[in-house]
Image (cartoon, rainbow, N blue to C red):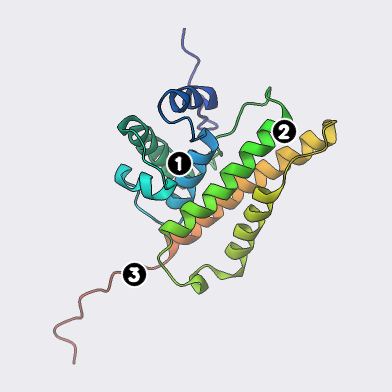
Amino acid sequence: MQAPFRKMRMTLDYSLVRDLLDRTAPDISPALLHGVLSGFVCSGGEFDAELLPQLLQVPVPPIVGELAEGLASRAREALASEDFVFEPLLPDDDSPLGERLGALGHWCDWFASGFAAGFMRPDSDLGADMCEILDDFAQVAAADQFESDANSQDEQDFMELVEYVRIGSIALFRHCSALPSLIPTEPDSHAH
């Protein structure tokens, strides 16, 4: 029996993605892969599976390229949704908090790499607010973990971090999507 499709959020199954990667590309985690793809998509980059080895700086089997194309497509669709359904791909809530925080750190770290690879514009086009979001992501990436005796406040703090990353990603995507094209337009031949 299939679980009903949830319209509110476009959730992906972290464990299914992890199983595929464990069998085909064990050095790549789901959070790393989804982070780099999300960053690239948010930057305005057009993802193609042939870019993946460059983005990850490791060779990848074709099946991982196919997975990446699907993840990038879903990320773009979720980021563009008016319902704010985008979410970083992280371990489920039953996983230990340290594991979830580590995955969020990897996600943010690789988001920055993907964003940098796809953003082919002057930094001034980002503006102060978007640069601050990227700086905040770098701080999340640098955070090691919460105290070992994770408590309900730690859970609340983690949920707030994930929400910030989620909304920050959407803001970056929308900002970059609204920037004018860098492709020069043909000058009007009738203009003098």
Task: Name the image quarter holding residue 97.
Answer: top right
**Amino acid at the residue labelled 2:** Gly
Residue annotated with mark 3: 182
Single out the mark in the foreground, 1 or 2: 2
Q: Is residue 160 above or below residue 112?
A: above
Say which residue appears at 63% left-offset and 55% top-offset: 138
User: Left or right: where does residue 170 sit relative to residue 67?
Assistant: right
- Crowding near the residue tagged with mark 2, few <14, some 14–19, many ≥20 C-alpha atoms within 10 Å: some
Q: Residues within 10 Å of mark 1 (few under 14, many from 20)?
A: many
Q: Position of residue 85 (x, y in %)?
A: 53, 38
Which amino acid type is shown beneath numbered disc 1?
Answer: Ala
Q: Position of residue 21 (x, y in %)?
A: 45, 28
Q: What residue would you read off at disc 1?
A: 75
Cα distance in 3D space between marks 1 and 2? 25 Å
Q: What is the secondary structure assignment of the residue under circle 1?
A: helix
Residue 173 is at least partly visible in this image: no
The residue that disc 2 covers is 98
